[in-house]
Image (tube, rainbow, N blue to C red):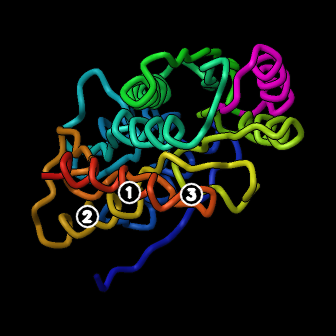
């Protein structure tokens, strides 16, 4: 798109405001924040600098500032695809599956609800055990919850909990259970354990937002939602999935993308 990009990394929450101020000082035309936790800092900056354009991935506001474009994704759809994959692939005598979330924030809840819908659509006898770690960093907590779920007969756990996920993956690998990742393709972390990933195509959302700005069409104040209809969400096709399962899920994707 012929643009120049500068990256500023926040090592702690305290860095958000300073990094936004730095981006403004650099005379950035569009400042994009990544992550729910940046919502308040972006909102405050948008009010202080009404002529500055902002966007935020996974941002959430009660009232969206007119100079902010939230880039959001239909996690329910991504979770739904993963749920279908799991129900078609994982054989479980107990019919018990697990979901571990970080906090009960909208994106995490959406993943859970979509995952359950996909499971039940294929396997009406499925039960989804849900627990929140109240953390996005505590891998040890992930291990404890995953071990507890495994002991209760759960054969596959979807985890949407940031750094907590690492503990879940480790436990699932040790106990020969499957895990489902979120946000990006993560089977490379543990190829024989991570069955699939519920993917949000952040690259698509960010690229389209920048293109809209470059073309003069970016309108702040409203969510831009990415779903199957605009190639915004998907599932990871790993080597653990059969051709039959992939073909089945692809047919559902095709129907829902129209």
* Closer to viewer: mark 1 or mark 3: 3
- Residue 251 location, x and y as percent? 27, 53
Q: Is residue 245 left or right of residue 70?
A: right
Please identify the quadrant where the N terminus is shown. bottom left
**Vertical placement of 198 versus 132: above or below?**
below
Image quadrant where residue 70 sits:
top left
Q: Which residue is drawn at the image coordinates 46% and 28% (left, top)? A: 119
Q: Which residue is drawn at the image coordinates 76% and 55% (left, top)? A: 190
Name the residue tied to disc 1.
Answer: 31
Numbered label tally: 3
Query: Badge 1 local density, few (<14 within 10 Å), some, or many (20+)?
Result: many
Query: Helix, strand, or loop for circle 3?
Result: loop
Numbered tag placed on residue 185 in the rendering: 3
**Vertical placement of 70 versus 157: above or below?**
below
Name the residue tied to disc 2.
Answer: 208
Q: CA distance from mark 2 to mark 3?
A: 20 Å
Query: Helix, strand, or loop for circle 2?
Result: helix
From the image, give the main secondary structure of the stretch colored magenta.
Answer: helix
- Residue 98 location, x and y as percent? 63, 23
Q: Along the polypeptide, which appears first: circle 2 or circle 1? A: 1
Image quadrant where residue 150 sits:
top right
Q: Along the polypeptide, which appears first: circle 2 or circle 3? A: 3
Span highlighted in magenta in the image? 137-157
Q: Is residue 213 magenta?
A: no
Q: Which residue is drawn at the image coordinates 39% and 53% (left, top)? A: 234
């Amino acid at each position: 798109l012929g643009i120049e990009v500068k990256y500023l990394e926040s090592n702690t929450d305290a860095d958000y405001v300073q990094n936004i101020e730095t981006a403004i000082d650099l005379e950035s035309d569009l400042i994009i924040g990544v992550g729910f936790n940046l919502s308040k800092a972006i909102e405050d900056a948008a009010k202080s600098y009404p002529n500055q354009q902002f966007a935020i991935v996974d941002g959430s506001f009660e009232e969206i500032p007119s100079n902010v474009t939230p880039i959001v994704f239909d996690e329910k759809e991504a979770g739904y695809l993963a749920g279908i994959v799991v129900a078609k692939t994982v054989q479980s005598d107990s019919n018990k599956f697990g979901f571990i979330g970080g906090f009960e924030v909208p994106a995490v809840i959406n993943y859970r609800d979509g995952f359950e819908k996909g499971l039940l659509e294929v396997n009406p006898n499925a039960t989804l055990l849900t627990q929140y770690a109240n953390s996005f960093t505590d891998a040890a907590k992930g291990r404890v919850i995953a071990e507890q779920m495994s002991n209760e007969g759960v054969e596959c756990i979807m985890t949407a909990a940031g750094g907590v996920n690492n503990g879940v993956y480790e436990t699932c690998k040790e106990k020969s259970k499957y895990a489902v990742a979120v946000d990006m393709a993560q089977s490379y972390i543990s190829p024989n354990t991570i069955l699939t990933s519920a993917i949000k195509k952040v690259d698509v959302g960010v690229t389209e937002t920048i293109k809209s700005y470059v073309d003069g069409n970016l309108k702040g104040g409203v969510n831009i939602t990415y779903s199957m209809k605009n190639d915004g969400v998907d599932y990871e096709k790993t080597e653990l999935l059969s051709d039959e399962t992939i073909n089945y899920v692809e047919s559902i994707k095709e129907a829902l993308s129209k």
